[in-house]
Amino acid sequence: MVVRMRHNRGQTGSRRSHHALKTAVLSLCKDCGSPKKPHDICTVCGKYKGKQIVDVHTKIAKKNAKAKEKAKKAGK
C-alpha cells in the first residue's frame, strides 16, 4: 500500500524537536552532601527533609545475607 500524505523533512523535524533527552536535575543532600533527585529520599543516608525514612545500613545487611543464602543453596 502506498503512503498518500507524506510529510516532508521540515514537518518531521518539527515533530521530533521535542524528543531530545534532558539532563537529570540533581540537588545535594543536606545531611551527607551526596547528589540526589529533588523531592526524593537520599540513597546514601536514607533521609528526607531531615527525617530518617529508610535505615540504609540494615537494608544493605539484609540484602547481603539474602545473597549469601541464595549462593549457599546454589552451591549444594
Image (spheres, grey):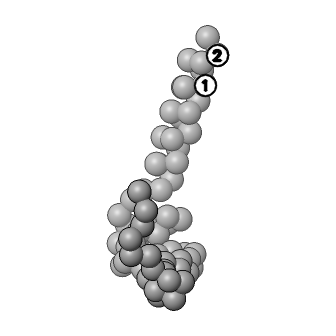
Q: Residues within 10 Å of mark 2 (few under 14, many from 20)?
A: few
Q: Could you tell me the amino acid type at mark 2?
A: Gly
List x then y, in percent, for residue 68. 58, 29
Q: Name the residue that disc number 2 marks.
A: 75
Q: Which mark is residue 46?
A: none
User: Relative to residue 33, is residue 14 depicted above or below?
Assistant: below
- For the N terminus, the image quarter is bottom left
List x then y, in percent, for residue 71. 60, 25
List x then y, in percent, for residue 13. 52, 84
Which one is in front, 69 or 40?
Answer: 40
Q: Residue at x 46, y 86 (%)?
A: 11
Q: Residue at x 51, y 53 (%)?
A: 57
* Secondary-structure class at tag 2: helix
List x then y, in percent, for residue 33. 56, 79
Q: Residue at x 57, y 75 (%)?
A: 34
Q: Residue at x 37, y 66 (%)?
A: 52
| Label pair 2/1, CB-CB below 8 angstroms | yes
Q: Quadrant of residue 5?
A: bottom left
Q: Could you tell me the amino acid type at mark 1?
A: Ala
Which one is in front, 75 or 30?
Answer: 75
Q: Residues within 10 Å of mark 1 (few under 14, many from 20)?
A: few
Which one is in front, 42 or 18?
Answer: 18
* Secondary-structure class at tag 1: helix
Q: Name the residue that disc number 1 marks.
A: 71
